[in-house]
Amino acid sequence: MSAELDALRAAVRAAATELGGHDLCRRLDPAGPGWDTRAWSILAEQIGTATLGLPDSCGGIGGLDELAVVAEELGAALLPVPFLSTLFAVQVLVGAGSAEDVVSDIAEGQPAAFAGLDRRGWWSPDHLPFTASENSHGWTVSGHTPAVPGAAGSRWIVTVAATPDGPDVFVLEASADGASISRVETLDLSRAQASVTLTDTSARRLTTGGSAATALLPALDLACIVLAAEQLGGAQASLDATVRYAKERRQFGREIGSFQAVKHSLADLLVLVESSRSAVTRAVEAEDRTEAGSVAQAWCSDAYRTVTAEAVQLHGGIGFTWEHHCHLYFRRARADAQLFGGSAFHRERLALALAW
């Protein structure tokens, strides 16, 4: 870890603590976008998280190292901000290479979301929810997708739509005529999702010749690694909280952490967390992000679910209460397991890539 990364980690952690961390999830306006606008403004505009991983021409700084550090801290705090959704959308735009004005707007703090993944949380040219058509005024996009993270409250919507030439990347303003975006209720209280319906909505075509995959797949690989870092942060926070509770909670005249069964459970969780850290570290440093990202996502998704489920059990009855934070991490872990393919999908992807 360099001094710059340490400083970035400290800044994000301090901001998350000052803003209220996971307590913000309970205080969100039910009629709002599902994320805290003040928290996103501080992170994006004051700390500069919206510029991470972007080209120099758009004011970008840092790379995957910085993204992983920020993601880990946000995952630990469960701060309800559109970090991952905006990052994914803007990386697709960067890959398309023809929307610097939109990328610069996002770098200044405007949120964005990507609509176009299939039910697996991945992308397939055979399952495109949107179609595009050209007229005398340009391109329009129509279609529907039921659950898009970060779409409510975003200024920009990035998607892939079917054209006569094949799937291409499009970008449009969320406020454009024909665009209907409505927040939907989900298990995860810290990462809002929304239904996106487009009806002949004007959009800008960014790729041609059905070349969407060249922009989308590298963005998906990067998003998998960043999500794994988020999951690592959440798993570590859950473990830390459970260890503290085991040292404080007394039963039968002694701390429950002194019982051998509890010690063994916590030791098993520590192995899962440290293995997740190794997977994320390897993925951040790897040249082949496709293989390393799938390994990290396959491992961290399962590890996060196991750690949070055991954390609830080891907290006992209090772990199930609304006021306690255990269920928030449990909910996030379950929802994360459906993003960007999930562990079973990535294991299958690895098996096919390695020709097993």
Image (cartoon, rainbow, N blue to C red):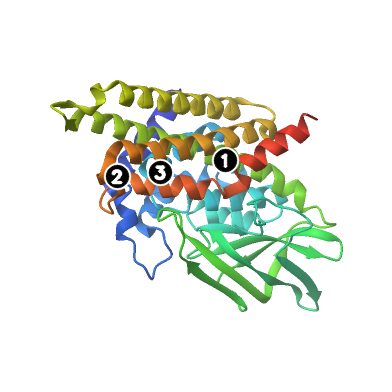
Nearest the eye: 103 or 235: 235
Instruction: Give the residue drawn at x 42%, y 61%.
Output: 34
Nearest the eye: 248 or 44: 248
Q: Which residue is mark 2?
A: 319
Figure quadrant of residue 240: top left
Figure quadrant of residue 179: bottom right
Q: Which residue is mark 1?
A: 53
Provide residue 337's location: percent of width, then percent of height: 54, 45
Nearest the eye: 91 or 356: 356
- Amino acid type of disc 3? Ile
Real-space CA distance between mark 1 and mark 3, rounded to the nearest whole angstrom:
14 Å
Classed neighbour count for the residue bearing mark 3: other residues with Cα under 10 Å, few (<14), some (14–19), many (≥20): some
Q: Which residue is mark 3?
A: 47
Could you tell whether 113 is left or right of 210 in the image? left
- Image quadrant in which the C terminus is located: top right
Provide residue 347's location: percent of width, then percent of height: 67, 36
Instruction: Give the foreground label among 1 and 2.
Output: 2
- Disc 3 secondary structure class: helix
Classed neighbour count for the residue bearing mark 2: other residues with Cα under 10 Å, few (<14), some (14–19), many (≥20): some
Instruction: Give the residue drawn at x 60%, y 36%.
Output: 298
Q: Earlier in the sequence, mark 2 or mark 3?
A: 3
- Disc 2 secondary structure class: helix
- Amino acid type of disc 1? Gly
